[in-house]
Amino acid sequence: MKFNHINLVVRDPEASAAFYADLLTGAVQTVWLGDSLHLRNDEGVDLAFQQGTPSSAPGAHHGFLAANAAEVDDLLAKLKGEGTRITDDCTEDGFRSIKFRDPDGYEVEVYWEGDWPATSGE
């Protein structure tokens, strides 16, 4: 099996799709499937947005893997410039991550990790 999508309940599916497409996914296509707006990338993975009342649980988040630490830093600068709420900023040896809130309050992580896992357990 292959991971395909995550569905988020949001106030405005079009606005959420624009936020994620602009900042995170590099999505190439949006399509309504039933009552969800799907934002699809080149690999066929979707972020789906269904209109309703958002319900973000404490501690729950979804993440995006960056190509390198500089990509995380560039996004952090852009988010700060737009006034986006940053909830975590972590730099460790071989790991760089930020967490922030999307327009509906969901926590999003963008991270880069060097040689993963950091220890092989051997």
Image: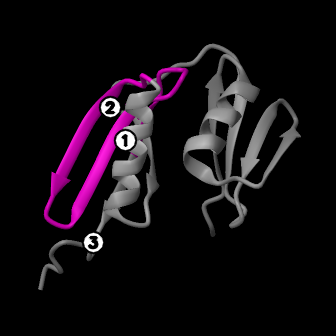
> Where's the N terminus, which quadrant?
bottom right
Q: Which quadrant is home to the C terminus?
A: bottom left
Depth check, mark 2 against mark 1: the one in front is: 1
Q: Are marks 2 and 1 in contact (CB under 8 Å)?
A: no
Residue annotated with mark 3: 114
The picture places residue 7, in percent across and down from the top left corner, at: 65, 38
Residue type at mark 2 is: Gly
Which is more N-terminal, label 1 or label 2?
Answer: 2
Identify the residue at horizontal 60%, vertical 61% (top origin). Answer: 3
Is 90 magenta? The answer is: yes
Considering only order in the chain, which callout, 2 or 3, is on the residue closer to the N terminus?
2
What residue is disc 2 on? Answer: 59
Q: Is residue 47 magenta?
A: no
Q: Secondary structure at mark 2?
A: loop
Question: Could you tell me how far apart the alpha carbons at marks 2 and 1 are, in whole angstroms?
Answer: 20 Å
Across and down, in percent, residue 109 comes to 39, 44
Q: Secondary structure at mark 1?
A: helix
Tell me the crowding category of disc 3: few under 14, some 14 to 19, or many 20 or more residues within 10 angstroms, Cα based: few
**Where does the magenta region start and end?**
83-109
Q: How is the image coloured?
A: one colour
Residue 98 appears in which quarter of the rendering? top left
Name the residue nearer the viewer: 57 or 117: 117
Quick one: which residue is furthest to the top in this view?
53
For label 1, the residue is: 76
Prevailing secondary structure of the magenta residues: strand
> Disc 3 marks which amino acid?
Gly
> Which residue occupies 18% across, 80% down?
120
Real-space Cα separation, disc 3 to disc 1, in angstroms: 19 Å
Name which of mark 3 and mark 1 comes first in the sequence. Answer: 1
